[in-house]
Amino acid sequence: MRLKKYLGILLSGIMVLSMAACAGTDKGQTAAPESGQTEAAKQQTKQEQTKAEAGNGDITKVTMWSNDQHDQAVYEERIKEFNETIGKEKGISVEYTVYGSDYYTTLDVAVTAGEGPDIFKCNKIGNYAEAGYIMPWEDEAGLKGLVDRFAEYNAPGYGEFGQKTYSIPFRVTTYGIACNMDIFNKYGLKTPETWDEMRACAKAITEGSKEQAYGYALAMGYGSYNYFYLNLPNAASVGDEYFNHTTGRYDFESLGGFFGHLQGIIDDKSMFPGFETMDGDTARAQFSAGNVGMIGVMSSDVTTFKNQFPCDFEWEVIPYPVQDASNRYKEPIGVSMSYVINSKASKGGYADKVAEFMNYLYSDEVFVATNEAQVDISVLGDEITSKSKVDGLDPNWIRFSDMDVYCIKYPNPDGDLSIEGDSYQDVYNKILTGIVTDVDGALKDLTERYNKALDEAVASGKVNINDYIDPNIAEKMKWGK
């Protein structure tokens, strides 16, 4: 009782919105069957009871939690539409709740207490699967079509665990370089395709403006700068990440050329001053003020530069330049965390109701709606963008949505390793701030230490290396434009 009271206080304290389009009784909590029944008989009894109640006009309430505020309005509208059409016909009402920054803490308390929602964004699929908190989608026939359709985008570490599917990826965050075209046109510059051209553009902007504007701003204060603006862009030049998904080994030495590229911009004094501690919003603010020619951006910045940091000039996103324009690869991207299904849906006999809604949630109709609202990019790429009929989509949103530039990669085993000494993030910081000057030596040391930790994790059974080997990565990375 105390736990439920605490949970109620915690939920009400941080909840930012709860939307229920129509009320109904919660059939996730069905009456307990008589004692002495087998588990199969209990399950059948619950399923029959739930369906009978729905057939009598009762509504099965399905609860869904998320922390996605960027697409909240679109999901509210779509879920309202579901409740008033398919849901009304099938006896289902979906209650959608969006939480703030403490979402995962709140979620963990609720799930472990048996008070979690039916559908929720999850950041620890493996842990919850092992504990039995979430159900494999293979257990519900109504989910098979979704599992099959998205299988090529899924992988262990995304939505798969223990040879079972617990979630399917449905959207991605893409990235690139934003160029202030007013500045580029002022100095007669073309958007760069190579590292050398990017350095030359940065220098021309800095010198031409007499340091009133700088060529490039690398926001090292942004926690994921090393992921989006070092590791992934470098892969477009060398064909894979610092973790090689073909060999199953770490190869930080493959970043040597990229650090040389960045160091050249720094040496030219074309990097925005204070980049070592600059956060993402500061970089965006400087860019929108016309003080920077180029910055790294993500697909979400299309709306950021309209609402939070409006630009009064034309800007254009381009793929991050590569070492050799005649030998480039696609840019690898990971998938965003997706939704799982609480095991209580299966145990309570209403997994079929949840499946009905999940098929709507992952439908082309919803994907097109989020694309047209310019809030989410579907993993299905052109299959979805080609169906969008709305006029006036931002040209940069269309460029960010071009999945011919990107390929979906497997995750890396970093999180399961015990590293002795500095992490690669620490070493990157020390290289770019001049604390470490022997770049080749530092990268070689990283390779050796990470592979040692990987070998130990594999030997202990903590890591199954086959989960991180993608036999098709070389083909996926081929540039076809």
Image (cartoon, rainbow, N blue to C red):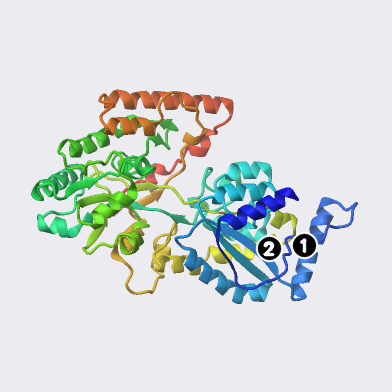
Q: Residue type at mark 2?
A: Asp
Residue located 17% across and 47% down the image: 214
The CA span between labels 1 and 2 is: 9 Å
Under tag 1, what secondary structure?
helix
Considering depth in this image, is 278 or 152 the residue closer to the camera?
278
Q: Residue type at mark 1?
A: Gln
Under tag 2, what secondary structure?
helix
Look at the image and tell me whether residue 55 can be seen: yes
Q: Position of residue 372 (x, y in %)?
A: 40, 69
In this view, 53 is above or below 267:
below
Q: Kindly give the residue lying farthest to the right in the view shown.
A: 36
**Mark 1 closeness class: few <14, some 14–19, many ≥20 residues within 10 Å:** some
Q: Position of residue 74 (x, y in %)?
A: 48, 68
**Mark 2 closeness class: few <14, some 14–19, many ≥20 residues within 10 Å:** some
Quadrant of the rendered structure where residue 265 is? top left
Considering depth in this image, is 295 or 54 the residue closer to the camera?
295
Quadrant of the rendered structure where residue 347 is? bottom right
Q: Position of residue 78 (x, y in %)?
A: 52, 70
Quadrant of the rendered structure where residue 49 is? bottom right
Considering depth in this image, is 215 or 337 the residue closer to the camera?
215
In the picture of the structure, the residue carrying the numbered disc 1 is: 47
Q: Is residue 400 left or right of residue 365?
A: left
**Which mark, residue 352?**
2
Q: Position of residue 341 (x, y in %)?
A: 63, 55
Q: Is residue 351 left or right of residue 304?
A: right
Residue located 44% across and 59% down the image: 380
Give yes or no for contact between labels 1 and 2 (Cβ–Cβ under 8 Å): yes
